[in-house]
Amino acid sequence: VEKLREGMSELELTVDMLERERDFYFNKLRAIELFCMELQEKGEANDVTKHVTNILYAKDDIKESDEGGVGANNGEGGE
C-alpha cells in the first residue's frame, strides 16, 4: 500500500509539472498569436507573420516540409 501511495504521489507531481509546462507554452503561443493578429490589423503583416499564423491554426496533422521546416504542409490552401 505504501508503494502505491508513493507512486500516486510521484504521478501527481508529474501531472502538476506537465500542466505548468503546458500552460507556459500555451501562454507563449497565445502571445505570438496576439502579436501576429496586431500586425495583421495594422496592415504590417509579412510572409513570416502569415506563415506563423498558418502554423498556429494548422490541424494536428502538421508534417515536415521538404526543407525540414514545420508547418509547410498543414492542409490549408496557400496564399
Image: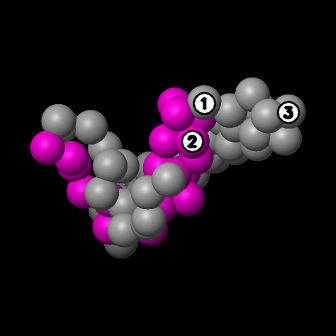
- Compared to residue 55, the image places residue 34 above or below, namely above
Q: CA distance from mark 2 to mark 3?
A: 13 Å
Q: Label 2: which residue?
A: 50
Q: Secondary structure at mark 3?
A: loop
- In the image, taking residue 27 as reference, residue 3 lies left or right, namely left
Considering the image in quadrants, where does the N terminus appear?
bottom left
Of the residues under marks 2 and 3, which one precedes in the sequence? 3
Q: Position of residue 20 (x, y in %)?
A: 60, 43
Q: Amino acid at mark 1?
A: Asn
The dot on residue 67 is none
Q: Amino acid at mark 2?
A: Lys
Q: Secondary structure at mark 1?
A: loop
Q: Residue at x 37, y 61 (%)?
A: 74
Q: CA distance from mark 3 to mark 1?
A: 11 Å
Magenta residues (range): 47-66
Q: Secondary structure at mark 2?
A: helix
- In the image, taking residue 75 as reference, residue 12 lies left or right, namely right
Closer to the camera in the image, 20 or 5: 20
Q: Amino acid at mark 3?
A: Lys
Q: Position of residue 42 (x, y in %)?
A: 85, 33
- The answer to whether mark 2 and mark 1 are in CB contact below 8 A is yes
Question: Would you call the spot at circle 2 few (<14 residues within 10 Å), some (14-19), or many (20 or more)?
Answer: some
Q: Label 3: which residue?
A: 42
Q: Residue furthest right?
A: 42
Q: Label 1: which residue?
A: 46
